[in-house]
Amino acid sequence: MRLLNASGCLDALTAPEVARQLDGFVTKTITPLLREGNAPPRIAETAHGMLNAIGLANPGRERFLGEVLPRLRELKRPIWVSVGGFCAGDYAETCAVLEDVEAIELNLSCPNVDEAADSAAEIVAACRAATSLPLYAKLSAAHPDIAEVARAVASAGVDGLSLINTLRGMALHPRSLEPVLERGQGGLSGPTLKPVALAAVHTCYAATKLPIVAMGGVTSGQDAIELVACGARDVALGTILFSDPNAPARVRAELAAADLDEAFASAHRVTQVLA
Amino acid sequence: MSRRELRSVAGVEPVGAYTLLRVERGGLDPGVPGQFFMLEAPGRLLPRALSLCLAPRGELAFLLEAVGPGTEALCALEPGERIHVFGPLGNGFRLDVERPLLVGGGIGMAPLPFVAERIGRAPAVLGFRSERHAEAAVLMPDAQVVVEPTLVTELIEPGYDVLACGPEPMLRAVAEIAPRAQLAWEAPMACGYGACYGCAVEIDGELKRLCVEGPVLEAA
């Protein structure tokens, strides 16, 4: 099992000591052009989670390739590049120019930008034609039939799945009843997502048997084991990194005595039960 | 060097309308005045960003106002309870100025006692919204204090190197009066170390992370 960060939850350049605790660093989503992101406020704490509406702030493809990626390589960690866009061509063009990275994660599920008009399978197919690098499709658990999406992207040629992204949510100021986030709505993350993540991983593993990078509310080694027991091959940390930059080392220590092979084997049994 | 440690609460005392929270310092470096720490708020998902108010021997002291569930949980701590403290973070004030003037508005006075301690004798002006809030000026005995409707910006005379912290309208007014001022800004932060991109503010015409670029920024 590899321990990664969830895209958008760590900047390896400002916190290299955190990135070094991971088995790979996943970048913030890169879009063809620079995006400043949404106007602040962009974050809000909720009862058992948090909302963000960052809006895919990133330097754009050209500056990422020229300025950011070379500095990331100096960290000597496997690099996963999260790729985003607004049509299949946006994604495929970025995939085509990426070389010598561990994998590409296609962000098909950011709740903070308007949806890509093209379907997940169309985007994956265009990217598959553009690169031979391992491709992971990051899906949203908000889809009414995530197994159908998982099968569609599997047919289109992905090598794995990243599950799950944030779910759309909203928070109001208790007195003014105005939205806390300037954008109004944002993506919900944190411990409140864990049951949703377990179900999505379970469903998609049963549907495709593809390798899965699982994330959603992981705060401990036990959470990671449970995701593996639902079919995850790798696990990523998201919101926990905000409150605990030492979380990767702690989670790894908590996993030291765990039998992950046995946990993964139980995923097979659990999905049999589902079937 | 920033570190994250589990620290014991040494004391929690009211100071007028605010609360002074003291934690045992352990291996944590107090840093430069204007830098901040992320304090675990019991029962909450995210820590809270607080600038260091004072660095008594063996302790770190934070001045805070209970304005929501996180700061309420911090104010309700009891001596001996333990919380994670992570810092120091961000960029503090430059202290090598010729004619310093410390300007604080409300809870924005929080970093100024530590500035005053490190910079030596410096004039200070503090503004508060009520007499009860103004009791916090006890932490800066030499400061000139005003209460609304008088505004602290009315006390700023020309020719000073202003170091200011306070609400956004106050900082914008200070920047007009003193273009060379160093201003400590505030923004909601989930992480404090550049990971979440939540604390974006407009800096030089671009949205940038306050925790990485600030929280202290040059006015001009």
Image (cartoon, rainbow, N blue to C red):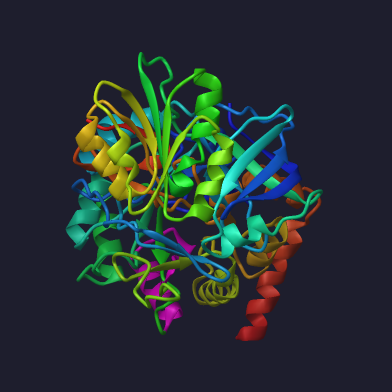
Which quarter of the picture shows residue A266? bottom right
The answer to whether residue A160 is magenta is yes
In this rendering, the count of numbered labels is: 0
Q: Residue at x 78, y 55 (%)?
A: A258
Decide which of A255, B55 is in the foreground and name it: B55
Is residue A16 toward the left or the right of residue A182 in the image? right
Is residue B44 depicted above or below B36 in this figure?
Answer: below
Q: Is residue A48 left or right of residue A36?
A: right
Residue at the (49%, 53%) spot, across then down: B131
Residue B72 is covered by the magenta coloring: no
Q: Magenta segment range? A: A145-169
Q: Position of residue B6 (x, y in %)?
A: 73, 43
Query: Would you say residue A59 is visible in this rendering?
Result: no
Residue A104 screen position, x and y as percent: 38, 50
Residue B163: x percent and y percent? 38, 29
- The answer, for residue B100, to whether it is visible in the render is yes
Of the 4 image quadrants, the one containing the N terminus of chain B is top right
Quadrant in which the C terminus of chain B appears: top left
Residue B100, image quadrant: top left
Task: Judge whether A177 appears above or below B49 on screen.
Answer: below
In percent of width and height, residue B40 lies at 63, 51
Task: Establish if B198 lies above or below A117.
Answer: above
Q: Is residue A266 left or right of residue B115?
A: right
Q: At 66% across and 35% down in the image, what residue appears?
A: B60
